[in-house]
Amino acid sequence: MLLTFYLLFIGLHVSEGCTLENRGEVLNIAAHAGGSVLLPCYCTDQHTTPERFSWKKDNKDTWEEISIESGQYRDRVQLFNGHSPGNVSLLISHLTEEDGGDYQCSVEGAHLIIRLTVKGCPLENRGEVLNITAHTGGSVLLPCYCPDLHTTPKTFSWKKDNKDTWEEISSESGQYRDRVQLGNGHSPGNVSLLISHLIEEDGGDYQCSVEGVHLIIRLTVKGCPLENRGEVLNITAHTGGSVLLPCYCTDLHTKVKTFRWKKQNRSTHKQEEISSESGQYRDRVQMFNGHSPGNLSLLISHLTEEDGGDYICAVKGSRLTIKLTVKGCPLENRGEVLNITAHAGGSALLPCYCPDLHTKVKTFRWKKQNRSTHKQEEISSESGQYRDRVQVFNGHSPGNLSLLISHLTEEDGGDYICAVKGSRLTIILTVKGCPLENRGEVLNITAHAGGSALLPCYCPDLHTKVKTFRWKKQNRSTHKQEEISSESGQYRDRVQMFNGHSPGNLSLLISHLTEEDGGDYICAVEGSRLTIKLTVKASLPFVPFALVTVIFLHIIVAVVYHTKRNKDPHYSTADGDGVVSLE
């Protein structure tokens, strides 16, 4: 019998259990009151599951086991052995100074000592005196905080030195009612104090106390030192416009309790308070301290020359003087004589305006020099020579006083005066009539009977509107000039004027001409005339339309016949389809 032996080798590894990392050592860990701390304790192989372990604290030479369910650590401790069974570290939250001491982590007979130090809140800058400056009406933050902002102080307070007595600050009553706020919401170690709507009385020494540690802050609350105070500012503006008198605190966020604007009365030498409700400035002044409380500037609108003078902006302990000069309207080109030429029937703009077009002029006049009486007559759109023909252009630009005269006549020519207070301007307007083009000449025009003829007659400026003009024809028999009219006589319904779109075009169109229309024509306007010699020739020979049609058809038949004959020598009109009958 043959015996066969099989050998099986099995490797057996015996785990050594949990070997603590840093065993036999003393670890020193520091944390802050109110925060959290992790006391590390774990096996070198964190996948190892210890059979037993415990956490204890040295309490006066006695090791007391730590429990999550009762005592000093109730609901404040947590083990970290969930995902890594070999990690038995201990997390302690909401630390207090009493949590400091020696902790022992024991795992299967091996021990690790951790010495925990829990620090309180040693105030930042403690023992010092901080100096802070702020402005009335604004806000200020008095800084007081622990080095670790996560530290939660057990007790703290804010006090102010009031005549050698420290009085506690409260938001519910007294001087600081609804004006103070603590900054320890998101960062428990920050116990800074915010004071809003500051007044000068808020200045003084403040004490921040945290668990027996003190910090002193000296607060200075300044009023409104005016920008440019003690100086005299010079400002120039124009009548009818607006001006801003600048007055503001160096810090625009400063809220000023009381301030005044006054003006020096030149007659009485007294300072009179400015108010929008009465007197010279009624409904014309406005304060600019809405969005920037430290801006006390004054806006004056609808200025008059009487608004000029010395203005004083005054706040507690500071003042500013502004010298305002209000100018009228010194007319552009004043004292000069402007020459303007226009044509009868057209329009003319007589320019008159202030250097600053935003200037509002209270009163002004347009006058014309009467050449007969040598007197100046006021121009009005409501009566007289200019009724409904003049218009002033000061709508969008109040300083523009220009005068527009329309439908000009030669009588509108003359000297015009534009006058405002202390300033005047003279304009000489020349209105020309219509000096006909080619005037004094004789034009020769030839046309045919039955056709039309255009007799040209026009002003050099086609925009000229001619009040009266005439077309006449020289009668060869009587040697008299007869007026041409479309309503009667030889030219009834045959003549037409061409002055619709171009008023200076006086040309005459004669249609359906006859030989009797030939002769001398005269185009006459005031002071100018033009002669045109019209020759009307007989019309071209007339051929009846029917005869022209027959001849044309015969030509077409001949062309068609010869074309087909060339292509087919046997082609004959006798074949039937090639016969064309002309009747």
Image: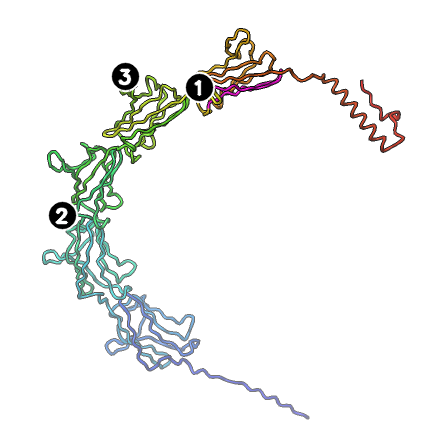
Q: Position of residue 272 (x, y in %)?
A: 14, 36
Between discs 3 and 2, the one toward the N terminus: 2
> Which is more foreground, mark 1 or mark 2?
1
Q: Residues within 10 Å of mark 1 (few under 14, many from 20)?
A: many
Callout in the foreground (3, 2): 3
In the rendered structure, are the residues bearing label 3 and label 2 in contact, judged by CB atoms less than 8 Å apart?
Answer: no
Outermost residue on the bottom side: it is 1
Q: Where does residue 383 sit, x and y in percent of width and height?
A: 32, 17
Q: Is residue 547 above or below residue 75?
A: above
Residue count near mark 3 (Cα–Cα under 10 Å), binned few <14, some 14–19, many ≥20 = few
Which residue is drawn at the image coordinates 38% and 20% (left, top)?
410
Residue 264 is situated, as x and y percent measured from the top left of the image, at 14, 38
* Residue 371, picture quadrant: top left
Q: Which residue is mark 3?
A: 373
Q: Is residue 486 above or below residue 175?
A: above
Q: Which residue is mark 1?
A: 466
Which numbered disc, 3 or 1, marks the residue closer to the eye?
Answer: 3
What's the distance in space between the residues labelled 1 and 2, CA to CA? 76 Å
| Near-viewer residue (500 or 100) | 500
Q: Quadrant of the C terminus?
A: top right
Write down the region rendered in magenta. Answer: 440-459
Q: First in sequence: mark 3 or mark 1? A: 3
In reply to whether residue 323 is colored magenta, the answer given is: no
Q: Secondary structure at mark 2?
A: loop
Q: Tag 2: residue type?
A: Gly
Amino acid identity at mark 3: Thr
Disc 1 to disc 2: CB gap under 8 Å: no
- Work out which residue is located at the far front of the displayed protein and give it: 441
